Every structure is written in structure tokens, then in C-alpha cells.
Image (tube, rainbow, N blue to C red):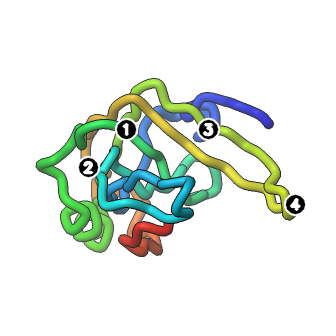
Amino acid sequence: MLNISLKGANEGNEKILGIGKEPQFAYDNAAGSFTEEVIGTKYQTVLQSNKYQHLTIRVLGDDPLPQLTHEELEAANDSGTPHLLIFKDGKVKFDVSKSGWFQASASATGVEVASKAPASSGIGKIAATTSNSKED
């Protein structure tokens, strides 16, 4: 297992492209399934300084950006001016699953909107694959 800062995973850039978000549901180990209890928010992001790698970042507790909806993040991305987010105390954990797959998980204690990427930045639309399901 390897732990690094989120900024380090993004080649030193603290601003990360936000392309979506959804509730993080609690998991019941005994039942082997997710509950209806919302325990945080999952942000779908793209590490633009690291070959545009997709990364879901979990922030536990109340949504730090309740005014910024999934639809707004998606629309900003579709228009070519995605929101740039800065995550507080962001960490990325790299591990190998029992079946041998490489996996990364990320968390932070908070998030804020830094700005929107200017249309002239060349970032353009980022392909987003989000499910809005409890299983993710």
C-alpha cells in the first residue's frame, strides 16, 4: 500500500477538474449492502496534470458544496469550462486488491471551488462516467 497527497498525485497541481458528485452511502458489513444513510459526498474528478486520470474523492460529513449540484458540474464540463476544485487534506491510497487489480481510493476533509477553467484553456469537455448508484 502506498499513500500520497492528492496534490502529489496530480503532479503538484492543487486544482482538480470536478465533473460530477453524488451522495456517499454507509455500508452495512453484516448485510453486505449499502444503507440509505448518507455519510458524505463522492466527487468525480479528473487529474488534468496526470494524464487526465479519473478519480473519485470522498468527503465525509455534510456536503461542503451543497449549492454546487451534480448537474451544474456536468453542464460546466459539457460547456468546456469545468469547475476547478481544491480539496483540503486530500490523500490517495494505492493498493492491490485480493484479485490482483491495482486500485486507488481518495479522500479529503473538505473541498472548495477554486474557479472555472477558462474556455481558452484548451481543457474542453472531459468524458464523464458516473452512475449515481449506491454500489460505487
| Mark pair 3, 2: CA separation | 24 Å
Q: Alpha-carbon neighbours of circle 2 within 10 Å: few (<14), some, or many (≥20)?
A: some
Front-lying residue, 84 or 99? 99
In the image, residue 22 lies at what x, y percent? 32, 60
Question: Where, by quadrant of the figure, is residue 23 drawn?
Answer: bottom left
Identity of the amino acid at label 4?
Answer: Gly
Q: What residue lies at 60% left-to-right and 57% top-to-bottom?
A: 53
Residue ID for mark 2: 116
N-terminal of the pair, mark 4 or mark 1, is: 1
Q: Secondary structure at mark 1?
A: strand
Q: Alpha-carbon neighbours of circle 3 within 10 Å: few (<14), some, or many (≥20)?
A: many
What numbered label is drawn on residue 100?
Answer: 4
In the image, farthest residue toward the left: 67
Residue ID for mark 1: 60
| Mark pair 2, 4: CA separation | 38 Å
Q: Secondary structure at mark 2?
A: strand
